[in-house]
Image (cartoon, rainbow, N blue to C red):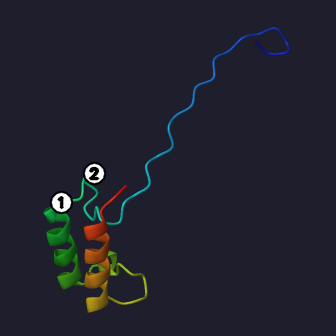
Amino acid sequence: MFSDGSEGIFTTAPAPAAHCPADFNHSGAVTVQDIFDFLSAWFVGNPQADFDHVGGITVQDIFAFLSAWFIGCP
């Protein structure tokens, strides 16, 4: 009840789930397909393949992605 005598119901929505970097294709799961999709992006120079955000797409991005992939998502 509010101070003016009216009533109401408060609801909350859960916070959006944080994006998991290892889920490269945003499917909601970390699968081998994420590796294939990452490598496809890497080979064509897609800016999303700059996984370590150091600037430029290098072999280090592959290592950074695979490290994240093996760790998985919470």
Taking depth in this image into account, of 19 and 64 the one nearest to the observer is 64
- Residue 58 in sight: no
* Residue 54 x, y percent position in the rendering: 43, 87
| Residue type highlighted by circle 2 | Gly
- Tell me which residue sits at (42%, 82%) in the image: 53
- Residue 51 in sight: yes
Helix, strand or loop at mark 1: loop
- Tell me which residue sits at (18%, 70%) in the image: 35
Quadrant of res 30:
bottom left
How many angstroms separate mark 2 from mark 1 (CA)? 9 Å
Could you say which disc has been placed on residue 31 in the image?
A: 1
| Residue type highlighted by circle 1 | Thr
* Residue 62 x, y percent position in the rendering: 25, 83
- Tell me which residue sits at (35%, 66%) in the image: 21
Quadrant housing the C terminus = bottom left
Q: What is the tally of numbered marks visible in this picture?
A: 2
Q: Is residue 18 left or right of residue 48?
A: right
| Relative to 65, residue 30 above or below | above
Quadrant housing the N terminus = top right
Could you say which disc has been placed on residue 54 in the image?
A: none
| Relative to 13, residue 47 above or below | below
| Relative to 4, residue 56 above or below | below
Outermost residue, front direction? 71
* Residue 32 x, y percent position in the rendering: 14, 64
Q: Is residue 41 left or right of residue 71?
A: left
Count neighbours of disc 2 (C-alpha within 10 A) and say few if under 14, some if 14 to 19, many if 20 or more: few
* Residue 2 x, y percent position in the rendering: 79, 15
Helix, strand or loop at mark 2: loop
Quadrant of res 34:
bottom left
Quadrant of res 72:
bottom left
Residue of label 2: 28
